[in-house]
Image (spheres, rainbow, N blue to C red):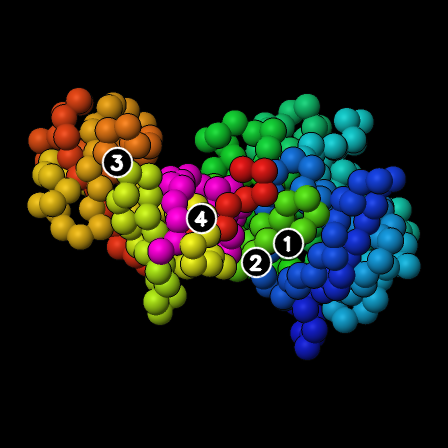
Amino acid sequence: MAVTVTPYPRLSLRGLTKRFGETLAVDGLSIEVGAGELVTLLGPSGSGKTTTLLAVAGFVAPDAGEIRVDGRPVSRTAPHRRGIGMVFQEAMLLPHLTVAENVAFPLRMNGVGRTEREAAVGRALDMVRLGKLGARMPDQLSGGQAHRVALARALVKEPRLILLDEPLAALDRQLREEMQAELRALHQRIGAGLLYVTHDQSEALTLSDRIAVIADGKLHQIGTPAEVYDAPADAFVARFMGESNRLGGVVEEIEDDVARIRLGGGLMVEAIAVGVRLGRRCVVSVRPERIALAAVTAEEMGDGALPAVLRDVVHHGDHVRLHLDAGPPGAAVPLVVKRPAGAPLGGLRRGESAAIAWQAHHARAFEPEVGM
């Protein structure tokens, strides 16, 4: 695929807003997708992800804001003139056409001549490793092959920007993981900007150069997978991006961005302060894999350690989940610690006492979410 060099982002959204009646589906969304960058829109159902994608594609007219592709405003441009390819959740291949004819379909609709069309189809099928299957019919393809044909159809016009709306959601887990690896490798070869929609946090972490976490049409955070996972911007991102233990408390002290929080039962812990205030309630968020656990007392473990009782050990193939009650009797809260499969548990047994602790920079203290 020829790569167009441009000083502009492949896609730029500025204040994108869309209402459906009384529902504000997209609320002033601003993001960019650079050349050769894969940005994922990640959020729960109804967060505005697909509406944003359809607005970029030209199938939904925004009420406000600006959409630019390679620096060119396209909000009033017809979909087929935006230089954008799109892949949907279902492959949506035309059953009466061969693989090659399906891929060629958008070129035929634009009046591209046969010789040029065949060359472009060959290049697109080679990109998705289906160069020898052009004569097959859709019902002769596996699920993964059908999705690769749909991707080839999006690539055949050599678009500057490709939009993908949960294209792997209908596949089983093993095939989905295989397709994720193929999609990432393909993206690194073609140089187009990709805007990818999913509600699957694992998929977003695997595929993305950057992740834009949205809810109720608003952008909560955009950053690299490491940034949004390890340094969530608010309580929603911490809760939505993977698993997180949540402990309620009151902020007693803030020094150098580290908050000391008093939990139920009077125990003190530390976490990075993110928008919290002295004397106010907060939620401490800490990932299960960031918690130290040992068969000792809290006093023996040291400052910041909490007493705990091991309730259960659950094996999940590649890791083990340790379910504990953390804190003093009468004020204990459920908490999960994760360890790699095969890691020694240091003599811990169900029903026995232990201690847990974490480093302050591995936890975040947020204001509680509204309604939580």
Tell me the quarter of the picture where residue 270 sits. Answer: bottom left
Q: CA distance from mark 2 to mark 4?
A: 23 Å
Q: Amino acid at mark 3?
A: Gly
The structure residue drawn at horizontal position 38% and vertical position 45%, both measured from the top left corner, is: 249
Q: Which residues are magenta?
A: 231-252
Please name whichever residue, 193 or 258, is drawn nearer the observer in this view of the structure. Answer: 258
Residue 345 picture location, percent across and down:
14, 34
Tell me the quarter of the picture where residue 359 sits. Answer: bottom left
144 shown above or below 61: above
- Which residue does the numbered mark 4 point to in the structure image? 282
Q: CA distance from mark 4 to mark 1?
A: 22 Å
Instruction: Give the mark, 2 or 4, whose residue is nearer the N terminus.
Output: 2
- Which residue does the numbered mark 3 point to in the structure image? 327
Instruction: Give the mark, 3 or 4, whose residue is nearer the N terminus.
Output: 4
Is the residue under label 2 in contact with that under label 3 (CB below 8 Å)?
Answer: no
Residue 255 picture location, percent across and down:
34, 67
Instruction: Give the mark, 3 or 2, whose residue is nearer the N terminus.
Output: 2
Label 4 Cα neighbours within 10 Å, binned few <14 / some 14-19 / many ≥20 = many
Hey, which residue is sitting farthest front in the picture? 279
Is the residue under label 4 in contact with that under label 2 (CB below 8 Å)?
Answer: no
Please name whichever residue, 343 or 137, is drawn nearer the observer in this view of the structure. Answer: 343
**Nearer to us: label 2 or label 1:** 1
